[in-house]
Image (cartoon, rainbow, N blue to C red):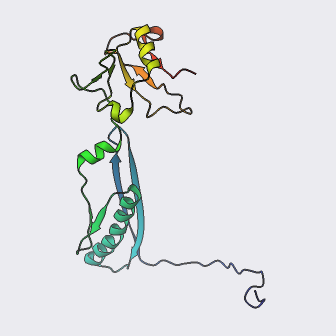
Amino acid sequence: MSDDIFDGAVDVSPTVAIITGRKISVVYERKTTDGNYGGTTCRTYVEGTVANDANEGQIAEAFASLFMPAVAAVLDQLGIGYEIDGDQIVREKIVAPTAIAMATPPRSVAPSGEQHVNAETGLRVLNAGWTEELNGPLPIWLINECRKSKVTAVFDNRGDATPQNKKPWFKEGVPRGGAGHGKDGEARAFWPPK
């Protein structure tokens, strides 16, 4: 590198921008759901200026020029598809509700008749949509523990259980107002044997 291009000193003089005109701002917020009582919110705030003597039409155009990129930025952040039509309007691409529901495995209590019942043991799995093909078969150690403690229904939490959060792999399903087989009548938790 030659000394005339870079001599080791960098000029960092402060620059001041003077903004003239009236400030305008746009806020856009969009929420998404994971289909299981959770979700994500994304919000953007964009500022601009218009001339002090701008008429209503010019102000409306300035707002529109701020709004479109604000909406596009939020939708990009959330991974939501969109298209910009000929009038420069951002339109979300509609996703079928079934695709959204399938994004997260369901964990709610299944209505009666939809619960999985193990043919050999009679042990019921209460997660809606639970199948052995999707979630894997019930482990033998769980079946044996349920027989010993007379537990007849469980929730499968294997998808959520990690060593960090210390959640049980399975938890007893207890009817409202009923008593579980755990300490003080609580629902019994089941971890894999060590």
Residue closer to the observer: 59 or 119:
119
User: Does the rendering let one see residue 68?
Assistant: yes
Single out the residue that lies furthest toward the left: 113
In the displayed structure, 190 sits above or below 159; it is above
Residue 52: percent from left, percent from top? 37, 78
Quarter of the rendering containing residue 5: bottom right
User: Does the rendering let one see residue 187?
Assistant: no
Residue closer to the observer: 148 or 163:
148
Quarter of the rendering containing residue 148: top left
In the displayed structure, 65 sits above or below 164; it is below
Residue 60: percent from left, percent from top? 28, 73
Residue 17: percent from left, percent from top? 54, 78
Residue closer to the observer: 111 or 30:
111
Image-based side of 180 in relation to 3, left or right? left
Image-based side of 103 in relation to 57, left or right? right
Residue shown at 35% from the left, 36% from the top: 134
**The C terminus lies in which quarter of the figure?**
top right
Residue 62: percent from left, percent from top? 33, 74
In the displayed structure, 141 sits above or below 29; it is above
Circle count: 0
Single out the residue that lies furthest toward the bottom: 4
Residue closer to the observer: 51 or 186:
186
Image-based side of 89 in relation to 37, left or right? left
**The N terminus lies in which quarter of the figure?**
bottom right
